[in-house]
């Protein structure tokens, strides 16, 4: 290989490297961490961000685990119609995690999520109807909700 070919190839490789660095750093102008960005969006009322923040507090992902904070953020998202947050809030009420156990509240939140097609909420609603937790025991309703969850 001649010296000229070596220089041309080296410049080509160098150009590709600089291009790759530019692609990798594109959009990285923010000094915030992804969690800080999520928090900012959540504070601005973004339901998806509120749900993600609730999940972070629920699992302790990136923040200290705090079920009370999880419930606060899930409720904000649930009040805006976020089905996942409605399901998680219903689950918290059903199990008494972060809130006093309240089957009536659990049913109400599961119903909101179930009406949006959330299969987990539909199943839990069916189970609660079959056990008579938060609602009168009703096997027909239980079958209806469990069938919807399975479809």
Image (tube, rainbow, N blue to C red):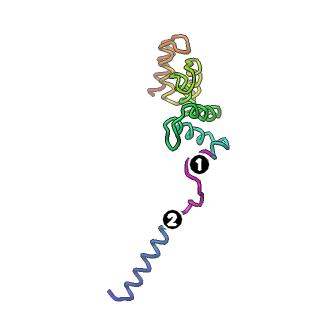
Residue 59 x/y as whole percent: 49, 37
Confirm whether the magenta stretch covers residue 33. yes
Q: Is residue 8 left or right of residue 102?
A: left
Q: CA distance from mark 2 to mark 1?
A: 23 Å
Confirm whether the magenta stretch covers residue 6. no
- Please tell me how crowded label 1 is: few (under 14), some (14-19), or many (20+) other residues with Cα within 10 Å: few
Front residue of 148 and 132: 132
At 41% from the left edge and 80% from the top edge, which residue is drawn? 10
Q: Which mark is residue 23?
A: 2
At 55% from the left edge and 15% from the top edge, which residue is drawn? 134
Q: Classify 54 as above or below 97.
A: below
Q: Secondary structure at mark 1?
A: helix
Residue 18 x/y as whole percent: 48, 72
Q: Secondary structure at mark 2?
A: helix
Q: Classify 83 as above or below 48.
A: above
Q: Classify 5 as above or below 33.
A: below
């Amino acid at each position: 290989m001649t010296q000229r070919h070596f220089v041309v190839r080296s410049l080509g490789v160098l150009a590709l490297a600089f291009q790759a660095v530019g692609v990798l750093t594109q959009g990285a102008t923010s000094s915030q961490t992804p969690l800080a960005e999520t928090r900012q969006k959540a504070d601005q009322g973004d339901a998806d961000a509120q749900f993600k923040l609730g999940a972070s507090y629920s699992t302790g992902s990136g923040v200290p685990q705090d079920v009370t904070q999880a419930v606060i953020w899930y409720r904000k998202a649930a009040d805006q119609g976020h089905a996942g947050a409605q399901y998680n809030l219903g689950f918290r009420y059903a199990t008494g995690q972060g809130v006093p156990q309240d089957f009536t509240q659990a049913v109400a939140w599961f119903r909101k999520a179930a009406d949006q097609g959330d299969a987990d909420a539909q199943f839990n609603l069916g189970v609660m109807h079959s056990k008579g937790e938060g609602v009168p025991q009703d096997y027909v309703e239980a079958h209806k909700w469990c069938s919807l969850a399975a479809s």
